[in-house]
Amino acid sequence: MKQYHETCCVPQCTASSKYNGLLSFHGFPSDPDLRRQWLANIRRDKLKLTQHTKVCSLHFTPDQLLQPKAAGGRRVVSRGAVPVLFSWSHRSVQPPRAGLRSRMEKNHLFDLKWLLFCLSLEELKQMTS
Ligand SMILES: [Zn+2]
């Protein structure tokens, strides 16, 4: 059997089995809907899949990965799991709610004014002492 190094097909992910033996690489699911979901999540819906097209274990949450039952076994993704962890996912997984955000920004502005006020008091004290 020809030995090849597995790499991850996720954009901005440089994981390779050549350098990191702790990672596991997972082929795409055979279910067409699930496969579409994987491609949509990794943002490569035009990707041409081969049997060597893999997604590394960095993109799955720990509960989506099933540890090998025997030593030397392969780690596998649980049935129906979809990769969710990406370098961009802090923006796309949980979009901030508009209402909450503007309220937070107002509070932040208030804090800033308060801080400036305190600072100027401090300066006044220094000038008068
Ligand atoms: Zn990866």
Image: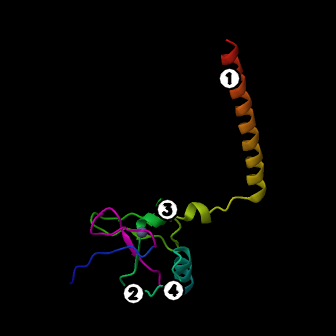
Q: CA distance from mark 4 to mark 1?
A: 61 Å
Quick one: SS at disc 2?
loop
Q: Position of residue 105 (x, y in %)?
A: 73, 48
Residue on which the image places disc 4: 46
Residue 50's label in the rendered image is 2
Q: Which mark is residue 123?
A: 1
Q: Quadrant of the N terminus?
A: bottom left
**33 is higher (above) or lower (below) than 20:** below
Of tags 3 and 2, the one toward the viewer is: 2
**Labels 4, 1: front one:** 1
What span is in magenta?
A: 11-31
Q: CA distance from mark 3 to mark 1?
A: 51 Å
Badge 4 amino acid: Lys
Of mark 1 and mark 2, the one earlier in the sequence is 2
3 vs 1, front mark: 1
Residue type pointed to by label 2: Thr
Q: Quadrant of the image for the C terminus? A: top right
Please tell me whether the stretch drawn in magenta is mainly helix, strand or loop: loop
**Observer-nearest of 111 and 70:** 111
As displayed, is residue 125 above or below residue 115?
A: above
Whether the residue under disc 2 has CB within 8 Å of ligand 1: no
Q: Give the mark, 3 or 4, whose residue is nearer the N terminus.
A: 4
The label on residue 26 is none
Q: Nearer the viewer, mark 4 or mark 2?
A: 4
The colour style of the image is rainbow
| Mark 3, secondary structure of its residue | loop
The answer to the question of whether label 4 and label 2 lie on touching residues, with beta carbons closer than 8 A, is no
Using the image as rendered, state which of residue 43 and residue 34 is in the foreground.
Answer: 43
